[in-house]
Amino acid sequence: MIGFAGYAFSQPDDPESALSTMAASIINGAKSLHWVSIIKPHFGACFIARRGEQFGLAESEDCGVVLAVQGQFASKTFAARTSDHRGETNAQTLLQHYTKGGIEALCDLNGRYSVVIWNGRTHEILMVNDRLGMRRLCWARSHETFLFGTEYKPFLDWPGISRELDDQAVAEFISVAYPMEERTFLRDVKLAPPGSIGRVTSKDLTWTSYLKETCGPTWENISLNECADRLGEVLDEVVSEYASAVEGPLVIPVSGGLDSRVLLGFAKRAGINSLKTVSYGHSHTYDVRFGRSLAHAAGAPHQYLFLPNSYVQKYADEEISVTEGETAALCFHNSILKEVLPLGSTLWTGFLGDVLSGGHLNDYSHIGSEEQRVDQLFADRYLNAWSDSEIIKIIVNPESYEIFDRAPKDTLRSLMQVSGDQCFEKRAIQTELAQRQRRFITYHLETLGRHFNVIHPFYDKRIIQAFQSIPVDYLFGQRAYKRMIVRFMPELAKVKCDKTLQTVVDMSKMTDYSLKHTMTEQFWNKLHPGIRWRLDGLISKYRLRHLSNTSYESIKCLLAKASGGWCGDHNRKAYAHYDQVIRDYKSMFSDVLSDDTLLAPYFKSQGVLEILNKHVRGELDATMALFNVWTFALWRKKFNR
């Protein structure tokens, strides 16, 4: 299932031609896709799907209702089993639910979905999505016309839609690698807020959140082993349900992390025999080495996919078109799976488990005020491009400096204030789910979903609720998650993890998970990600974090300058040598970054090229900044000329 687009409250001169143009912008020349349309007075919609699969459209002639859905639901949500190719069944079932119970009957279903309904009798559009908004739903107004779609490319040629940029969205993308809240690069185009109902008339639009609470009750008076067992029982039950719905071979990408090994372990417990694993990356990455070990421990076949530095050049055009430029090109490595797996393969992904289990959680209890905590959270989890204020001054035009420096942090402060849970750590998790995870996971699932039947067990509502019930103390250091792995899949727990180079068995024995920030750790978190990648192995081996900040700074600068960014142990913790991609393909970056028409009014091409040249010479690591600016410029070249 690919997506849909449409219009309401007006009638083009040639509705079929208008819908054909909208569908073509989503298909983007892909021969594996086809489309169908429904046209009513003052309403039209098209749906795009892979050939051989059903369309997510349903119509009720007697009550004048048309429903479009892009989604995937857990097997017990409807009578039909979970599968993208059952889209027509889901659309018809959703329509029946709506006619009996209204739009509220489609709220908080167990799945990832976005739904648009046209009620011809009341001349009203209704929209609803899942609780985290993991299926995109875009909208815009053009005079009397209301436009909707799972992508906004179909809106761009519609009369009255401005291509004026949203300054805050651009600032947020460059700073944290995605626009925040409901913004897109275009001021006229917005995303539906997660967990909400939208009601649209010819003159009005209102959004109402259907979520009464973001988190369920916490498990109380429970030991670590009891907590791990309760979590494991939920995972075992849910993954077994998904396993029973698998038709044909199943592919699980495995890495050195925890989430893929959990899926692999429970898939084997469920008795799936037609199981294949794949790992990708450069030849030395821990994800390949430990992924291969996990497959061997589970008795599953394994395939290694080499990820060359040319992957960005190869996939940039297609991926920027699909993501509409709102995910940094650095993340395009998943596209390598398209090279070797058959079209329509069933793919299980482990996204989301890391953040739900506390993998991104630090202890902020030692920090006094709420504002200081949010500032530290922003530095830890969001600020991945501008860790050096000098880069901002060189690259950003003075007129734009204030919004780049202020807007992303102000947005996070606002989001943390409105989050419902009183516990700061749980509010941090909820905010990350609705912001960073929502954007990145949606991108990965949508791009892979164009080629494969992608199943995402961690997004099952029962699993999310189980993780949200874990006491905070057991989330620090992923204590409950790791203990669950040891108790439910001991053989896989003996394989090392890519982040710590320790087995899960060894990590589960650790007791100090306070993760309080020492002065040196605070300094470490402010380093550029690329420098951290290069220095991490060396620091772990020789315990350089025990040096003073002054000594540490001197060593870091000396190593980075002397080795051109290749200091420390070989970078085995990333899929690709992202910093070296820029060096190998300097001309590809400079051709785009030298074009003032693509960078204005936010960036100075002279300053961007200065940072690029310093990066290439190894004087600094500006990997994230350069990738983000380059991605934005490519999007603008494609969509905003």
Image: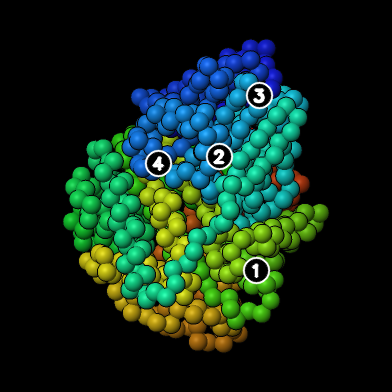
On screen, 64 above or below 238? above
Mark nearer the viewer, 1 or 3: 3
Callouts 1 and 2 close, C-beta under 8 Å: no
- Pointer 4 residue: 77
Q: Residue at 24%, 68% (x, y): give it.
A: 490
- Pointer 2 residue: 104
In percent of width and height, residue 267 lies at: 26, 52
Find residue 374 and name its label: 1
| Residue type beneath disc 3 | Thr
Callouts 3 and 2 close, C-beta under 8 Å: no
In percent of width and height, residue 255 lies at: 34, 58
Q: Residue at 70%, 46% (x, y): give it.
A: 599
Find residue 122 and name its label: 3
Q: CA distance from mark 2 to mark 4?
A: 15 Å
In percent of width and height, residue 458 lies at: 40, 53
Q: CA distance from mark 3 to mark 4?
A: 28 Å
N-terminal of the pair, mark 1 or mark 3, is: 3
Callouts 2 and 4 close, C-beta under 8 Å: no
Q: CA distance from mark 3 to mark 2?
A: 17 Å
Q: CA distance from mark 1 to mark 2?
A: 35 Å
State left or right for residue 413 relative to residue 402: left
Quadrant including the C terminus: top right
SS at badge 4: loop
| Residue type beneath disc 1 | Val
